[in-house]
Amino acid sequence: VKNAVLGMSKIGSTTCISCAANQLTANFGGAVLGSQFSLMNIFTDGEPVSDPQPNGATLRGILTAAGWDSISAEAVGNFDLTYLSNLVYPNPGTLIDGSPGHTLADIPNPLTQGFILKLADYDAYAAAVNAKLQKIVNNVVPIPAALPLLLSGFAAVGFLARRRRKISALAA
């Protein structure tokens, strides 16, 4: 992903955010592959001046009605802070400074707070996405809870092996 982003044209032009968001919704809908949550991530280096949907709050309403649970954004260079603040969800959007000298640990969980992450340059994108994923992804089975689960699995395997030996002995 990092190489794909770094290889893209970075001309600081206009961005049709609603075009991309509507196409993503048309292709996948809000419920992507039966997942529990659907998160839309916007990465922009421009302002949505050529966007047919110039109102971020209106687009947010369309996207959340289509099933998106979270909308967050990373922005580099010239971007329309008001538009993105109104677009991210859950709203209101929070601006996080991801430039050097600031910590990415301040990123909120995107399922509970929409945010715009202001990046200094394109090289910062990979670290920003990684920091965001750390806020979303939790262990499915926490380590303390895994031990009883593991022990019960071993007990079941042991029981089946013992039963198999007993049946084999009776058959002989």
Image (cartoon, rainbow, N blue to C red):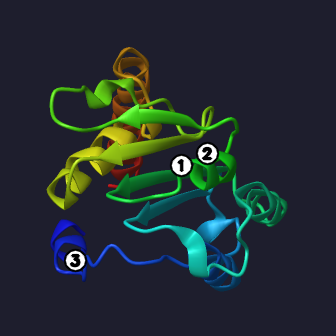
Q: Nearer the viewer, mark 1 or mark 2?
A: 1
* Quadrant in which the C terminus is drawn: bottom left
Q: Secondary structure at mark 1?
A: helix
Q: In this view of the protein, which residue sits in the foreground, 49 or 39?
A: 49
Q: Residue furthest top?
A: 144
* Contact (Cβ within 8 Å) of mark 1 with mark 2: yes
Q: Nearer the viewer, mark 1 or mark 3?
A: 1
**Residue 98 placed where, x, y %?**
29, 38
Eyeballing the image, is 57 above or below 127? below
* Total marks placed: 3
Q: Residues within 10 Å of mark 1 (few under 14, many from 20)?
A: some
The amino acid pointed to by label 1 is Leu
Give the mark nearer the N terminus: 3 vs 2.
3
Q: CA distance from mark 1 to mark 2?
A: 6 Å
Q: Which residue is mark 1?
A: 81
Q: Residue at x 80, y 67 (%)?
A: 66
Q: Secondary structure at mark 2?
A: helix
Give the mark nearer the N terminus: 1 vs 3.
3
**Residue 33 placed where, x, y %?**
60, 70
Q: CA distance from mark 1 to mark 3?
A: 25 Å
Eyeballing the image, is 172 above or below 16? above
Instruction: Give the quadrant of residue 22.
Output: bottom right
The amino acid pointed to by label 2 is Ser
Q: Which residue is mark 3?
A: 4
Q: Residue at x 58, y 52 (%)?
A: 84
**Residue 12 placed where, x, y %?**
33, 73
* Contact (Cβ within 8 Å) of mark 3 with mark 2: no
Q: In this view of the protein, which residue sits in the foreground, 117 or 11?
A: 11
Image position of 32 (left or right of 169)? right
**Residue 134 placed where, x, y %?**
35, 37
